[in-house]
Image: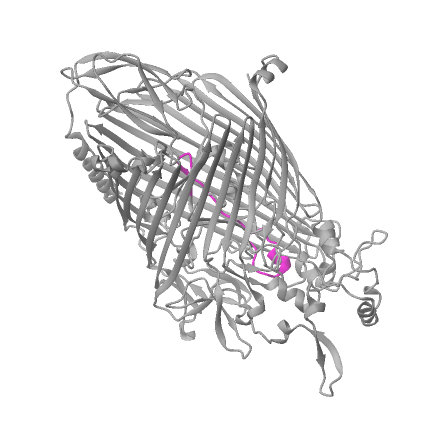
């Protein structure tokens, strides 16, 4: 620890030295200054921040837009007041000792430059000075329509952020990627920080793979598309979300930030009258898209019947998609919140009950959550903030996705002709030709996940120094995130695949307990001069993580029983992962006349996951911005652009190794009748290092024509070094594979947002936003042989990791069996189109999401072709002849190999209506009179999510991933749980 303390002491000394030497004397004469602030419609603006430039002296406007405070003057010289409010342009007003009755008008700011953005662990800055591209989504933008998770609500709303669902099952399962591929074998998800605390976003396999025979239970590469834990958070509790997309912005988070950082801030109370809000949303869900099935004629059905006996009972063409996926699931969400407080104590309390029935019978998701946020000021110098959340969820997920045993819905139906009747007769389910009866499986199999979670954190701020030009705070922030996840999988003896196994009745119990603890100790120092402001921070962080996963798998249990101890054969699997991290950080931010903004910082991390546990890996950052529109030479251009900023940033982040990359693991063995251990075939590298991402970013932020149009443009270049890869070993080593730092990759891309308010009148308003992003990646160096990654056999399409290629390139075989390139998972570009219209008390908003390109390996089409039930079989089929030219069957050219792998690689282009809502705000005077003053506001409306999709893709949804949250090999479709559209009817009340 001595080395850590010395490093921390050095950084803290630097903080004090770089800022403390500029102390100023306090002005002597004080004059009371008062006035009012209104918007461009002459309506009062409450909560406007007013600050004396060059100091930390200030106040804010009251509910009527009025303010007053005492301003110190030095020798009677003029001073400057700055007026700022989120969503409005900052204004400056010169005042003197004789100024009275100041009246200020603020105008809307399409770029929201007054918005405060988190730039470090203990600091923040106005967006107008920001030198990085940091995405922000506030609560109103987040909740355009009810959603399964916070991540789903962000889809299509921010350039450079790709949000895609792994499954349509209730409860979701979402993958988030920021600025393209940043790893191959490492962790893929962004770092999530909720109210200053790092939280868990794992997705733990249920054990369903032990039945489908797709992979091992408890696998971190889940093929069962489980719920990821960030979905536990109640979106209604969120105040805003900030996304640090690149290394230049996220460097202050060090060795865990190469995939970006998502900072979630929940709501807090404010002094004043208690505000109570109650809302009820009720609706339904239905399948978004169907794939259809072959329509058999009577002659073909009769031929099948002759060959299959009673199994092939002629009943026309049964629509199994409608039977399995045709439920209209009931949706319900009830929420209540209350906020308020006194000058010293404020509170925010909320509760949520949510129920989702799936589009498959017996599937669903339930959530109960409660939240309490408290703030209390013990004295002018000491303040405590606490954040507490308690969550309980239960999901029933059915059985879908990859399958090597014919047990999942999709695979079973792929081999079930429409004239085969699998519906029960007198309570008896017939066996199906595809290895199982999906109707019976739906009705009898249990795949349930139950989660209990507590997230609690506290922030203690003690002011060590306060003056008109300086402020020094000591901040302690710490907390824990604990969850228990229980999975229950039960397949009774009467299921077809259980009878065929020879060991009927499978019962699997899974339990995962995860605990994250985080603690920060930091100092934040601010100093203001007339034309300069310094913000400095330095601190020390400790984080511990432990995840303990146990799976008990039992077979051959007496009928009607599920206790695993009654099994004739059982097995237990346990995985325990522990990590202990320490870090120190320093950051300095300098503002020069609100025109130039400079930042430099350093983070140093060490971790038990690194090969050298004592070594600190350092991650520096530097950035700068200049607001050209604030200079005199720009005056002639103000009519065109009233705000124009250039920015540049550089930084480094890391991606710590996964546990398997460092250690040699063992498995059990029977040695001469005695239990023992033998090494597994894969070995870790005891000298493994974190991957390192270096990013350079350039950008322009500007608004034009008095705020009518705004643009935000960024171009970035990333180099990822020390890529963690798995390489083959010679057989003489005794192992097959080894982890090592053995590669480099480059990623570049651009992001563009265009924001506009084409129409603004007293009664009507139209706001629109267009987001565009494009990214490209290339493997630039490999110290191992090229290899395939993800997917299945080359003949079915797989991914190729090779120097000079994109890491998401897809290869396969041509008609002659040669290995050739067939496409790339990475899309050509992605765009989001959002619009909001208001007229009187009505508001209409909607969001379209367009993904152009990006190939998908559609093995669902391959399976339905094998089963001869593809919807285009009759149109595409050709005869199969024997050597004498006699017809012996039928086949499609796809299966015959006329096109090689080509038919299974499809263009994943789509346009989705992600969300839409229509809301009516009932007139307040009418509400007050009708409810005798008990109700302050009443809103009614209708909203929907994933309302339709336009695509040529032949599967259920091109937005698909069989393998869940993996870096390489995501776009593989093995007939997952289909996506659903949802429609809600909403009522919201504000109570007095």
Number of numbered discs: 0
Q: Is residue 464 above or below residue 601?
A: above
Q: Position of residue 417 (x, y in %)?
A: 75, 63
In this orientation, which residue lies closer to the viewer: 334 or 607?
A: 334
Query: Residue furthest toward the right?
Result: 426
Taking 635 as reference, is 931 above or below it?
above
Picture coordinates of residue 409, whole percent (x, y) = 68, 56
| Residue 558 visible at all | no
- Secondary structure mostly seen in magenta is loop
Quadrant where the N terminus lies? top left
The answer to whether 982 appears left or right of 665 in the picture is right
Residue situated furthest bottom in the rendering: 884
Q: Where residue 725 appears, x then y in whole percent?
A: 39, 62
Q: Is residue 510 visible?
A: yes
As drawn, 55 above or below 882 = above
Residue drawn at (32%, 54%) of the image: 717
Is 209 colored magenta in this rendering? yes
Query: Considering depth in this image, is 517 or 802 the residue closer to the camera?
Result: 802
Q: Is residue 797 above or below residue 178?
A: below
State the extent of the magenta-drawn residues as a range. Answer: 192-218
Q: How is the image coloured?
A: one colour
User: For residue 269: magenta?
Assistant: no
Residue 723 percent across, percent down from the top left: 36, 60
Q: Residue at x 28, y 46 (%)?
A: 649
Q: Locate the C terminus by quadrant.
A: top right
């Amino acid at each position: 620890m001595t080395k850590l303390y010395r490093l921390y002491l050095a950084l803290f000394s630097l903080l004090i030295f770089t800022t403390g030497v500029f102390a100023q004397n306090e002005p002597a004469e004080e004059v009371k200054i008062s006035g009012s602030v209104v918007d461009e419609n002459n309506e009062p603006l409450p909560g406007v921040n007013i600050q004396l430039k060059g100091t930390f002296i200030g106040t804010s406007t009251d509910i009527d837009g009025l303010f007053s405070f005492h301003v110190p003057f030095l020798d009677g010289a003029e001073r400057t007041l700055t007026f700022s409010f989120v969503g409005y342009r900052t204004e400056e007003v010169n005042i003197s000792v004789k100024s009275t009755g100041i009246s200020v008008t603020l105008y809307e700011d399409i770029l929201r430059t007054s918005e405060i953005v988190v730039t470090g662990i203990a600091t923040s800055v106005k967006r107008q000075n920001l030198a990085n591209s940091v995405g922000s989504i506030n609560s109103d933008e987040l909740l355009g329509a009810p959603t399964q998770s916070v991540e789903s609500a962000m889809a299509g709303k921010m350039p450079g952020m790709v949000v895609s669902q792994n499954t349509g099952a209730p409860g979701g399962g979402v993958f988030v990627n920021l600025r393209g591929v940043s790893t191959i074998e490492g962790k893929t998800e962004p770092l999530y920080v909720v109210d200053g605390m790092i939280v868990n976003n794992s997705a733990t396999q249920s054990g369903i793979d032990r039945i489908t025979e797709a992979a091992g239970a408890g696998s971190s590469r889940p093929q069962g598309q489980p719920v990821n834990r960030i979905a536990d958070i109640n979106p209604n509790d969120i105040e805003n979300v900030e996304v640090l997309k690149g290394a230049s912005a996220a460097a202050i988070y060090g060795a865990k930030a190469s995939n970006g950082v998502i900072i979630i801030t929940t709501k807090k109370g404010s002094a004043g009258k208690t505000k109570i809000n109650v809302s009820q949303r009720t609706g339904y869900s239905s399948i978004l898209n169907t794939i259809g099935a072959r329509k058999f004629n009577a002659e073909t059905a009769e031929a099948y019947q002759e060959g299959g006996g009673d199994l092939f009972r002629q009943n026309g063409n049964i629509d199994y998609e409608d039977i399995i996926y045709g439920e209209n699931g009931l949706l319900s969400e009830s929420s209540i919140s209350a906020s308020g407080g006194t000058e010293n104590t404020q509170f925010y309390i909320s509760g949520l009950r949510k129920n989702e029935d799936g589009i498959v019978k017996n599937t669903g998701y339930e959530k109960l959550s409660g939240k309490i946020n408290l703030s209390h000021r013990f004295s002018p110098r000491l303040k405590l903030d606490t954040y507490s959340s308690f969550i309980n969820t239960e999901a029933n997920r059915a059985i879908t996705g990859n399958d090597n045993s014919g047990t999942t819905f999709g695979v079973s139906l792929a081999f079930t002709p429409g004239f085969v009747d699998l519906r029960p007769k007198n309570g008896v389910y017939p066996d199906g030709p595809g290895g199982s009866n999906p109707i019976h499986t739906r009705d009898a199999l249990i795949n349930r996940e139950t989660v209990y979670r507590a997230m609690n954190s506290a922030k203690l701020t003690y002011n060590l120094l306060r003056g008109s030009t300086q402020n020094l705070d000591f901040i302690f922030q710490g907390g824990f995130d604990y969850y228990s996840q229980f999975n229950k999988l039960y397949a009774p003896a009467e299921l077809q695949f259980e009878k065929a196994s020879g060991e009927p009745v499978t019962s699997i119990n899974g339990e995962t307990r995860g605990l994250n603890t985080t603690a920060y100790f930091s100092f934040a120092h601010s100093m203001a001069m007339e034309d300069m402001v310094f913000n400095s921070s330095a601190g020390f962080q400790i984080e511990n993580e432990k995840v303990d996963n146990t799976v008990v798998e039992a077979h051959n249990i007496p009928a009607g029983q599920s206790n695993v101890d009654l099994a004739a054969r059982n097995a237990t699997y346990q995985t325990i992962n522990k990590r202990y991290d320490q870090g120190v950080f320093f950051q300095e931010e300098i503002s020069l006349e609100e025109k130039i903004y400079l930042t430099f910082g350093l983070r140093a991390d060490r971790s038990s996951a690194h090969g050298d546990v004592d070594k600190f890996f350092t991650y520096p950052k530097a950035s700068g911005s200049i607001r050209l529109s604030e200079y005199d030479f720009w005056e002639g251009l103000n009519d065109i652009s009233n705000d124009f900023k250039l920015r540049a940033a550089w930084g480094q982040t890391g991606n710590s190794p996964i546990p398997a990359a460092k250690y040699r693991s063992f498995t059990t063995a029977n040695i001469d009748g005695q239990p023992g251990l033998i090494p597994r075939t894969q070995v870790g590298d005891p000298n493994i290092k974190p991957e390192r991402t270096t990013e350079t970013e350039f950008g322009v932020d500007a608004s034009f024509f008095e705020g009518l149009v705004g643009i935000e443009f960024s171009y970035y270049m990333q180099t990822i070094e020390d890529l963690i890869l798995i390489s083959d070993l010679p057989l003489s080593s005794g192992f097959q594979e080894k982890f090592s730092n053995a590669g480099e990759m480059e990623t570049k891309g651009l992001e563009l947002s265009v924001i506009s308010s084409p129409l603004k009148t007293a009664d009507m308003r139209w706001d629109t936003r267009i987001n565009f992003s494009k990214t490209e990646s290339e493997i630039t160096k490999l110290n191992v042989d090229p290899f395939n990654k993800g997917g299945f056999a080359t003949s079915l399409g797989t991914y190729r990791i090779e120097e000079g290629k994109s890491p998401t390139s897809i290869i396969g075989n041509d008609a002659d069996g040669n290995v050739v390139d067939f496409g790339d998972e990475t899309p050509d570009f992605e765009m989001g189109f959002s619009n909001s219209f208001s007229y009187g008390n009505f508001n209409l908003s909607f969001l379209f999401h367009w993904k152009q390109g990006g190939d998908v390996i559609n093995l669902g089409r391959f399976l339905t072709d094998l089963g001869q039930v593809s919807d285009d079989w009759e149109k595409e089929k050709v005869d199969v002849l024997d050597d004498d030219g006699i017809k012996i069957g039928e086949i499609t050219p796809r299966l015959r190999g006329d096109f090689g792998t080509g038919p299974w690689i499809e263009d994943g282009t789509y346009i989705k209506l992600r969300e839409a809502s229509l809301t009516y705000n009932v007139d307040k005077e009418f509400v007050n009179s009708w409810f005798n003053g008990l109700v302050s506001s009443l809103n009614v409306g209708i909203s929907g999510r994933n309302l339709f999709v336009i695509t040529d893709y032949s599967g259920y949804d091109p937005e698909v991933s069989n393998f869940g949250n993996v870096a390489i090999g995501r776009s593989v479709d093995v007939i997952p749980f289909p996506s659903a559209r949802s429609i809600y009817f909403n009522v919201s009340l504000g109570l007095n």
